[in-house]
Amino acid sequence: MAIAISRRSLLALGLAPVALTKRRIAVIAHRGEHLKNPENSLAGIQAAINLGVDYVELDVRTAKSGRLILSHDADFDETKPMVAFDDALKLLRGKCGLYLDWKAASPEALIDALHKHKMIEKTVVYGSFEKLESLAKLDPRLKVMPESVSVPNLSRCLSVLKPKVIAFNHRDFTDEIIAVARQAKVEIYVDRLGPNDNKASWIDAVKRGATGIQTDHPEALITVLSSVHA
C-alpha cells in the first residue's frame, strides 16, 4: 500500500519545486519488523505485513543442505532452526512485495522459488551487476535492482540491465546520480538505515526524488508519510 503524497502536502512541508508532483512512496521493512521480532523471521514478516508495508526486505542464502534460507550473515549456525525461503514466500504471497537481498544462491534456485509462489512480479532483487544480469536472462519480468554507485555505473546498468528500479544508500544518494535515475524515469529506492533512519532524512529523501524508502522503523515511517497525505 504505497502512500500518495500530494502537491499541497509537499508544499506544506517546504519541499523544493522538483518534488511537487503526486508521488507514491513505497515503505520497505528492513529484515521485516524486527524491533519487536527477530530479523528475517516469519513473525517479523507477518508483523510488517500487518503494518501495511509495501515490501519486506529479506536476506537469502543457500544452506549446506541446498535449501534456501533467510540469513544476513554468512556464518549462520545450521544446527539452529532456520527460516526457509519457501515459508517466507508462502507468507508474503498475495499480501506484500519482496525486496530480496541476494546474498548467496543460484539464479535458477531463486527463479524456481519465485515461480512456485507466484512472486515473480511482486519481487525486486538487489545484487551485483553480474548476478542480476544472469537472473534477468532467466525471466525478464523480474525486477532487478542494481546499486547506483556512480553516474558511470548507473549509466551502464540502465543500458544493459534496463531496470525499472535502482537502489541507493547513504553514499551514492547524491543529487548528480539521482538526476540520472530521474531522467531515466526509474523508481528510486533508498535505504535510510542507521543515523539516517529518522523523519528528517525520510522527508529529505522524498524531496530529492525517492519513490521507496527502506527503514528499520516501518511503523514510524508509515505514520510520517500518512501525516503528509492530503
Image (tube, rainbow, N blue to C red):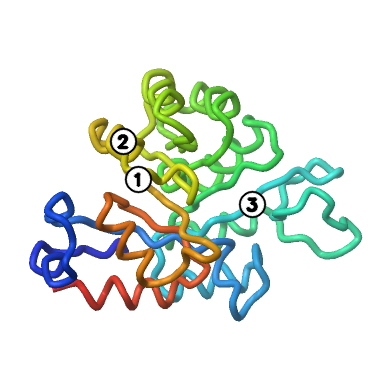
Q: Nearer the viewer, residue 18 or 137?
A: 18
Circle 2 sits on which residue? 181
Residue 151 x %, y %: 39, 28
Separation of marks 3 and 1 at Cα, in angstroms = 20 Å
Q: Which residue is mark 1?
A: 188
Give the quarter of the figure containing the C terminus. bottom left
Residue pointed to by mark 3:
59
Kindly state the secondary structure of the residue where label 2 is placed: helix
Marks 2 and 3, Cα distance to the nearest angstrom?
25 Å
User: In front here: 55 or 7?
Assistant: 7
Residue drawn at x 54%, y 56% as measured from the top left: 57
The answer to whether 224 appears left or right of 127 in the picture is left
Q: Tell me the crowding category of disc 2: few under 14, some 14 to 19, or many 20 or more residues within 10 angstroms, Cα based.
A: many
Residue type, numbered disc 3? Asp
Marks 2,1: beta carbons within 8 A: yes
- Residue 170 position, x and y percent, is 48, 51
Using the image, determine if residue 183 lies above or below residue 85.
above
Name the side, left or right, on which 219 lies relative to 103.
left
- Outermost residue to the left: 8
Q: Residue furthest right?
A: 79
Q: Residues within 10 Å of mark 3 (few under 14, many from 20)?
A: many
